[in-house]
Amino acid sequence: MPGTRYKTHVAKSASPLPFIQRQIVVMPSRRYKTYAIEGIVPVIHPTAFVHPDAVLIGDVVVGANCYVGPLASLRGDFSRVVLEDGCNVQDNCTLHTMPGFDVIVGRDGHIGHGVILHSAHIETNAMVGMNSVIMDRATIGESAIVAAMSFVKADAKIPAKHLVAGVPARVLRELTDDELAKKIAGTRLYHDLARRSLATLTAVEPLTTFDPDRKRLEVDRPMPILQRKMQKRSDKT
Ligand SMILES: CC(C)(COP(=O)(O)OP(=O)(O)OC[C@H]1O[C@@H](n2cnc3c(N)ncnc32)[C@H](O)[C@@H]1OP(=O)(O)O)[C@@H](O)C(=O)NCCC(=O)NCCS
């Protein structure tokens, strides 16, 4: 974190190249798992929340108000990984590159649980559904949605505001205004989660008993949109 002082000392090299001295930064517990490679250090904006169990290596840049979930791995050891402002990269995501082809997630990009982005470009406000794989040099257009469990081929160009799905992914149709609004509402929840996590997330020992009257989380639900969706489902049945 900016302003935090870490103890730094130069260790006797355990590197196979004896002339390279390894600099070890000793961090206080519950801090970031961030690593430099060849002197290139990850950058995290102070208003972003990066879970302490996420791993960031090398040329990684995390913008303002981003959320990076536990066990996400952002590896900038071949090229650059950029999260523009307001993105979320959820639990278990892997963002990696081949040399010379960056991963870029545009502003308010929404990257669901378990996604793999490999040298891909996700444009502003697009969403990639859970467990999808986006291959090298593919571009997901502005405000497009990739359905959960999709495989987007290398060099694919997904048009803005369209839904793609499948293995390999095919463009299905244009997104409706409701779907676009739902995406924006979902991303806002993650903006808020970044703030809430920065303010209150703490490592604790668990309790051993459940109190049925214990407090519940009070998170605003995007109700009108959910209600419309539930109505649609019940109309079908
Ligand atoms: C693709 C998606 C947007 C479709 O939502 P929807 O229009 O409400 O879809 P429905 O649930 O009404 O299903 C419509 C059809 O699409 C199919 N479908 C839904 N999701 C699918 C997916 N991921 N891949 C392939 N087909 C899918 C359904 O089986 C259904 O087919 P049918 O008409 O033959 O029965 C949604 O299923 C999805 O994948 N969302 C991603 C959510 C996510 O991962 N968010 C990130 C974490 S927060």
Image (cartoon, grey):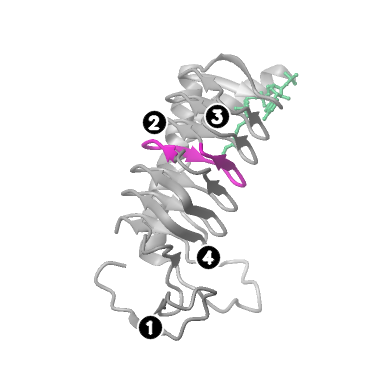
The C terminus, quarter of image: top right
Comparing labels 1 and 3, the label whose residue is closer to the camera: 1
Residue occupied by mark 1: 10
Which of marks 2 and 1 precedes in the sequence?
1
Q: Would you say the residues marked 1 and 4 are in contact, meaning their CB atoms lie under 8 Å apart?
A: no
Residue occupied by mark 4: 53
Residue occupied by mark 2: 124
Question: Taking 130 as reference, is 43 left or right?
Answer: left
Identify the residue shown where x is 46% and y is 74%: 30
Comparing labels 1 and 4, the label whose residue is closer to the camera: 1
What whole-number distance in Å separates the C-alpha atoms at marks 1 and 3? 58 Å
Q: Which residue range is magenta in the image?
A: 103-119
Residue 98 image point, x, y percent: 53, 43
Residue occupied by mark 3: 227
Disc 3 packing (10 Å; few <14; some 14–19; many ≥20): few
Comparing labels 3 and 4, the label whose residue is closer to the camera: 4
- Magenta stretch containing residue 106, yes or no? yes
Residue sitting at the far right: 237
Question: Taking 55 as reference, is 210 left or right?
Answer: right
Give the amino acid type for the residue marked by disc 1 in the picture: Val
What whole-number distance in Å separates the C-alpha atoms at marks 1 and 4? 25 Å
The N terminus, quarter of image: bottom left
